[in-house]
Amino acid sequence: MRLQVALDVVDLGSALGLARRVAEFVDILELGTPLVKAAGMGAVSAVKAAHPDKVVFVDLKTADAGELEAGLAFEAGADVVTVMGVADDDTVRGAVAAGRKYGKEVVADMIAVTEGRVARMREVAKLGVSFVEIHAGLDEQARPGYSIDRLLADGREAGVAFSIAGGVKAATIGAVRDAGASVAVVGGGIYNAPDPAAAAKELKKLAA
Ligand SMILES: O=C([C@H](O)CO)[C@H](O)[C@H](O)COP(=O)(O)O
């Protein structure tokens, strides 16, 4: 299973600093949505230039104009972008069309799809996304009683390639791997750690 770090910081300097510390232990560097909104597509180019050997994942969370938004990120150097799984099918198709044009990948982020999530994951897979991200966002995680278990259950049931995001940490990354995920996404479990590099190293070992 591959390890993806979500660079959920809001300025490019912090993102580059965090990426530099953890890159050797991760497979995928994600520019989180807040970073993209704060720093723009220039941040995509800067991270790719600093880490040409890493997969650069740009969490656009596109909800409309799929081909246009995905194309902007691919032009800037993204290897993978996200489109909202809850978006219109034509938005997903548009992002996928941009991916085909640039020879890059599109992931459907299933954040906010709670009812009928497995069925929707199968639909977007048929629309051509490379895999789905089964995701509980930061607001959902903050609610009392949040558990990653439902994400894992949906992954096991779906029969499509998936990643898991939603507060993954050392205590849960083994269960993410055992559920069959291709990628574990970790944000706070790395950037909030006292030593992000040590946390990433440990997570990589546990993910293997
Ligand atoms: O995508 C994310 C979130 O919606 C903020 O943009 C996070 O990057 C993702 O949830 C991973 O972060 P953690 O949940 O802190 O591991």
Image (tube, grey):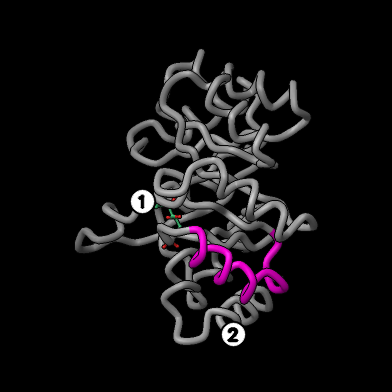
State which image quarter holds ligand 1: bottom left
Q: Quadrant of the C terminus?
A: bottom right
Majority secondary structure in the magenta region: helix
Residue 198: numbered disc: 2
Q: Which residues are magenta?
A: 12-27
Q: How far apart are the alpha carbons under marks 1 and 2? A: 24 Å
Judged left or right of residue 10, residue 103 is right
The CB of the residue at mark 1 lies under 8 Å from ligand 1: yes
**Front-most of 172 and 45?**
45
Q: Residue at x 50, y 73 (%)?
A: 190
Q: Secondary structure at mark 2?
A: helix
Q: Residue furthest left?
A: 144
Q: Earlier in the sequence, mark 1 or mark 2?
A: 1
- Where residue 64 appears, x then y in whole percent? 43, 21
Quarter residue 2 falls in: bottom right
- Where residue 72 appears, x then y in whole percent? 59, 29
Q: Secondary structure at mark 1?
A: loop
Q: State yes or no: residue 151 in magenta.
A: no
Please state which amino acid type lies under the numbered disc 2.
Answer: Ala
In the depicted structure, whether residue 9 falls above or below residue 182: below
Image depth: mark 1 or mark 2 in front = 2
Q: Residue at x 55, y 40 (%)?
A: 41
In the depicted structure, whether residue 166 falls above or below residue 70: below
Q: Residue at x 28, y 52 (%)?
A: 140
Please state which amino acid type lies under the numbered disc 1.
Answer: Gly
Q: Quadrant of the N terminus?
A: bottom right
Quarter residue 78 falls in: top right
In the depicted structure, whether residue 15 falls above or below residue 193: above
Residue annotated with mark 1 = 137
Report the label total: 2
Q: Residue at x 58, y 50 (%)?
A: 163
